[in-house]
Image (spheres, helix red, strand yellow):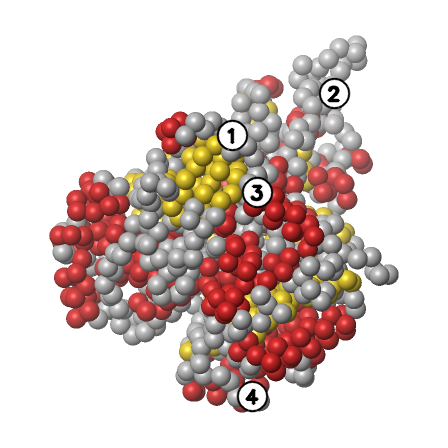
């Protein structure tokens, strides 16, 4: 593996999970290892390296390179150490005269069909073939190949039929067949690690070569998802990052955490000087275990994109062009405006929006800014529009607002329910781990209106796909519970021991009502009764049952109710408190869990303690020296409503683009336009900045120290890889703004902020940078009772005491189809893009997704006269936009689907202001629409583009 910078030793074969230990002798040294361990790994455990080319410890042993031969006393021949398991008393020799001769012979054969251009090769210094040639003592090659794969023409000038040109179609890496040694590591990585099965070895013998798809396919047009597993596995320059070819071999690395989705992958940022050469997944990362996706592995170029703003800017009016100023001028301008607003309109007239892309420490300071400086609780975060129902639903039922498991738990599950989530696109590294478990025999139930990839893809197929009608989640989940209760499938002993029995009795009476039977709900949900019953029985009696859900659960008018229903299912079946089970929200952004933990909601202080709690407020009042407001503040929708009404006038928005990401774009624009001071703190002039008066340039994840908290509650270190291009980390910018307002904060490093978090927040009481350096990461709660963190929640009891069953009555959304709007629109993400696309649109990832498209069923398209790639008008009661159509049977008749990554589409001009009853989470997933042919972008889109262009004018610095 290409990990020479930090010695992450490759042991050759995976670790055995056996509890039975075996002792053997390797080159005179006794070594004790678990039964089932390979001889190669046992030798490595003893510090003895056996030469290898086809072996790697993240894949099953293959035994093709014949370089890892050993001698075993009492056995004939020279077996491959990677495929030979250890045995008690075995005596192994790794370095004998015979072995030396055999290995040199094998290496001669490899080198005879390999170009000897090592000095100019991009893998020079990072080539395992080169290393192994040295390890076996190869000094000359006796063989001269009659035919080879690396010269375009023979000595007579004739074309070499074995030679193939380099494939550089992928924007991030090249494939050079001339340097391939056919070790199959790339093929096996694609199969075993990623689970895509995009690569194969075609041909036999000397004609063998790696192939991506059909003969006419390139890496770009094949099924390859550009996760980088094949590139990382390649021992030569056959598969090589283009960045390494362009920049050179890295010289040092820094361990940090990815800033995309909520999986929280650990990476080595490999550097040459202050230039980032590549991001390599860190094999000891506990969330990703050495794997990655296209975004984390390759899509980091946005950090140095030409669109990035590096100097502060201000303007008196949103119709004026921007003017570059000094930091002192910008912060002074912002502070004066916010003070004037509060003096004129009262202290409740301003607020903040924290960022789920920034660190815990930065988020903590932003909520502190509004509570201790603005003196109100007007703070909210993007979780409002994604996972706020998770916080409410799990808090009510279990007593804590987070998932119950770690990602390793999926390796022990028997039945997986994926509801309202698309892991292969939204959380691809977790999806790879899930697919691996499914290939091992676990069963899968998908509950989704759209046929996501997990329903059927290479070597996996869902046992049940409940293709429900959008908006009927509660009815489906309650119907599943009906089957479990009425058929006697509930785990009564678990319920009696761990849950409130009286509440269960009430809940059981509710779900047993015949109106919740699958036969009664089939017409409403569109899910066949027999299919739903079979799925319910499988989950209840199939062994360890785990539920993973996403925004297709929470972004509904009954999002909180569905989360409660999911928690009910887990408690009904006893699937809580051990490996392989649990309720697991798949968080959308890298630190959306952390932003909630840090007190970003207007009713909660850090650690999910209500602002009305006197003892909780007292902790912060003593430390901060202020008196805190005991009344909850405004949520984002309330802020916008109040702005339109004229009572909310100032906003500090860090790292969020509410104009593109929040529903009902026209209403968001009206709210922002009505404010007297909008401060946008971001990397780019995003859509929200069109209405801003102050722009404070932000720093990327590569330029800061701090922590992220992922979907499994894992607190990971973010480490500064390079100096901030704007001059300051985001936490420093917030501190400077607070001090301009008169705060007097004196933090000098993010570790001091974490120390304050630990001192004030019980679930973080044991967290420190020193512990994170020692342990790598910890999962909260981390405190005196759990000094190394808590991988599994609710093991001996629920955080709230007894698990609480709550009735889940289905209430139809107010957003209904009719003659004018007969279709239902639902939205989601695609693999190559992330959220509003501010980062990924500024990378080569646009080669896979250059625009948002509307997925529509062929039947719905035919009756409207729409063909594939036609422009269509997508209209709702809120607005309309135009985009191209994509005909597909992934969606059911009556349902259309689109993504929201491109501001040119502005899909959220379509969505309505309906929201979850408990949390105001917008109902993105159910919008009544009509689709009709169009000639191109709508008038509104053209007007929006013109307004955005005017809003982004920047005066030359001299003016």
- The residue carrying mark 2 is 151
Among numbered discs 1 and 4, the one appearing first in the sequence: 4
Q: Earlier in the sequence, mark 3 or mark 4?
A: 4
Between the C-alphas of marks 3 and 4, the distance is 51 Å
- Residue located at (57% from left, 29% from top): 221
What distance separates the C-alpha of mark 1 from that of mark 4? 60 Å
Q: Earlier in the sequence, mark 1 or mark 3?
A: 1
Within the image, what quadrant is residue 696 found in? bottom right
- Residue 20 against residue 446 in the figure, above or below: below
Mark 4 Cα shell of 10 Å, populated few (<14), some (14-19), many (≥20): some
Instruction: Work out whether residue 703 can be spotted.
Output: no
Q: Nearer the viewer, mark 1 or mark 3?
A: 3
Residue 256 coordinates in the image, percent (x, y): 62, 59
Identify the residue under disc 1.
870
Q: Nearer the viewer, mark 4 or mark 2?
A: 4
Left or right of 469 on screen, residue 80: right
């Amino acid at each position: 593996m290409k990990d020479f910078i930090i010695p992450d030793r490759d042991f050759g074969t995976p670790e055995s999970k056996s509890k039975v230990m075996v002792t053997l002798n390797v080159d005179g040294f006794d070594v004790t290892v678990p039964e089932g361990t390979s001889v190669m790994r046992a030798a490595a455990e003893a510090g003895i390296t056996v030469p290898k080319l086809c072996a790697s410890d993240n894949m099953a042993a293959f035994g093709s390179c014949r370089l890892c031969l050993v001698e075993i006393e009492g056995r004939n021949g020279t077996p491959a150490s990677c495929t030979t398991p250890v045995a008690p008393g075995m005596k192994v020799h790794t370095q004998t005269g015979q072995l030396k001769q055999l290995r040199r012979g094998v290496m001669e054969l490899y080198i005879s069909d390999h170009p000897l251009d090592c000095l100019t090769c991009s893998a020079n210094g990072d080539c395992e073939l080169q290393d192994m040639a040295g390890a076996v003592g190869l000094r000359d090659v006796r063989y001269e190949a009659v035919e080879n794969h690396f010269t375009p023409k023979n000595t007579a000038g004739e074309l070499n039929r074995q030679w193939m040109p380099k494939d550089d179609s992928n924007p991030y890496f090249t494939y050079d067949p001339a340097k391939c040694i056919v070790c199959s590591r790339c093929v096996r990585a694609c199969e075993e690690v990623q689970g895509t099965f995009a690569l194969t070895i075609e041909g036999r013998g000397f004609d063998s070569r790696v192939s991506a798809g059909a003969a006419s396919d390139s890496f770009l047009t094949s099924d390859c998802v550009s996760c980088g597993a094949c590139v990382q596995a390649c021992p030569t320059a056959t598969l090589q990052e283009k960045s390494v070819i362009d920049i050179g071999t890295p010289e040092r690395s820094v361990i940090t955490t990815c800033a995309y989705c909520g999986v929280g992958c650990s990476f080595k940022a490999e550097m040459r000087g202050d230039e980032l050469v590549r991001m390599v997944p860190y094999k000891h990362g506990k969330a990703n275990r050495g794997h990655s996706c296209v975004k984390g592995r390759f899509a980091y170029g946005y950090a140095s994109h030409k669109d990035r703003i590096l100097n502060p800017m201000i303007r008196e009016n949103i119709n004026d062009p921007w003017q570059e100023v000094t930091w002192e001028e910008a912060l002074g301008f912002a502070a004066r405006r916010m003070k004037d607003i509060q003096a004129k309109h009262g202290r409740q007239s301003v607020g903040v929006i924290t960022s789920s892309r920034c660190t815990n420490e930065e988020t903590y300071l932003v909520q502190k800014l509004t509570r201790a400086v603005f003196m109100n609780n007007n703070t909210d975060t993007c979780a409002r529009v994604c996972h706020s129902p998770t916080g409410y639903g799990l808090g009510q039922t279990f007593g804590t607002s987070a998932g119950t498991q770690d990602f390793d738990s999926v390796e022990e599950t028997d039945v997986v329910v994926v509801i309202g989530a698309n892991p292969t696109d939204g959380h691809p590294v977790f999806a790879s781990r899930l697919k691996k478990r499914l290939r091992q025999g676990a069963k899968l139930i998908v509950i989704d209106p759209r046929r996501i990839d997990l329903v059927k893809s290479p070597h996996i197929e869902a046992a049940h796909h409940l293709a429900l009608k959008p908006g009927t989640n509660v009815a489906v989940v309650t119907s599943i519970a009906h089957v479990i209760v009425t058929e006697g499938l509930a785990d009564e002993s678990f319920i009696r021991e761990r849950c409130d029995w009286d509440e269960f009795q009430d809940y059981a009476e509710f779900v047993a009502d015949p109106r919740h039977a699958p036969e009664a709900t089939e017409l409403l949900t569109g899910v066949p009764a027999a299919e739903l019953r079979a799925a319910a029985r499988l989950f209840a009696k199939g062994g360890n049952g785990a539920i993973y859900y996403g925004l297709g659960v929470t972004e509904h008018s009954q999002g909180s109710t569905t989360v409660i229903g999911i928690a009910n299912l887990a408690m009904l079946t006893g699937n809580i408190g051990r490996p392989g089970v649990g309720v697991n929200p798949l968080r959308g952004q890298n630190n959306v869990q952390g932003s909630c933990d840090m007190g970003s909601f207007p009713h909660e202080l850090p650690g999910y303690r209500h602002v009305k709690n006197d003892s909780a407020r007292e902790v912060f009042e003593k430390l901060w020296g202020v008196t805190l407001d005991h009344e909850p503040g405004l949520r984002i929708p309330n802020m916008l409503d109040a702005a339109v009404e004229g009572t909310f006038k100032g906003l500090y928005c860090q790292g969020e683009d509410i104009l593109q990401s929040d529903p009902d774009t026209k209403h968001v624009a009206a709210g922002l336009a009505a404010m007297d001071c909008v401060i946008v703190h971001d990397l780019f002039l995003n859509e929200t900045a069109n209405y801003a008066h102050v722009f404070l340039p932000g720093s990327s994840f590569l330029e800061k120290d701090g922590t992220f908290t992922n979907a499994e509650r894992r607190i990971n270190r973010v480490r500064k890889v390079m100096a901030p291009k704007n001059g300051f980390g985001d936490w420093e910018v917030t501190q400077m703004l607070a001090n301009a307002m008169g705060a007097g904060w004196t933090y000098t490093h993010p570790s001091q902020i974490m120390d304050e978090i630990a001192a004030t927040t019980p679930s973080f009481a044991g967290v420190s940078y020193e512990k994170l350096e020692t342990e790598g990461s910890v999962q909260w709660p981390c405190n005196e009772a759990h000094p190394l963190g808590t991988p599994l929640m609710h093991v001996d009891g629920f955080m709230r005491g007894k698990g609480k069953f709550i009735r889940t009555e289905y209430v139809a959304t107010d957003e209904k189809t009719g003659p004018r709007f007969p279709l239902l629109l639902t939205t989601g993400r695609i693999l190559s893009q992330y959220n509003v696309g501010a980062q990924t649109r500024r990378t080569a990832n646009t080669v896979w997704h250059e625009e948002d498209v509307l997925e529509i069923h062929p039947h719905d398209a035919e009756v409207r006269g729409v063909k594939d790639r036609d422009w269509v008008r997508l209209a709702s009661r809120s607005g309309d936009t135009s985009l191209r159509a994509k005909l597909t049977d992934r969606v059911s008749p009556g349902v259309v689907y689109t993504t929201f990554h491109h501001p040119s589409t502005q899909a959220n001009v379509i969505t309505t202001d309906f929201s979850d009853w408990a949390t105001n989470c917008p109902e993105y997933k159910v919008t009544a629409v009509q689709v009709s042919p169009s000639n191109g972008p709508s008038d509104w889109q053209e007007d929006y583009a013109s307004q955005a262009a005017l809003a982004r004018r920047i005066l030359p610095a001299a003016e």
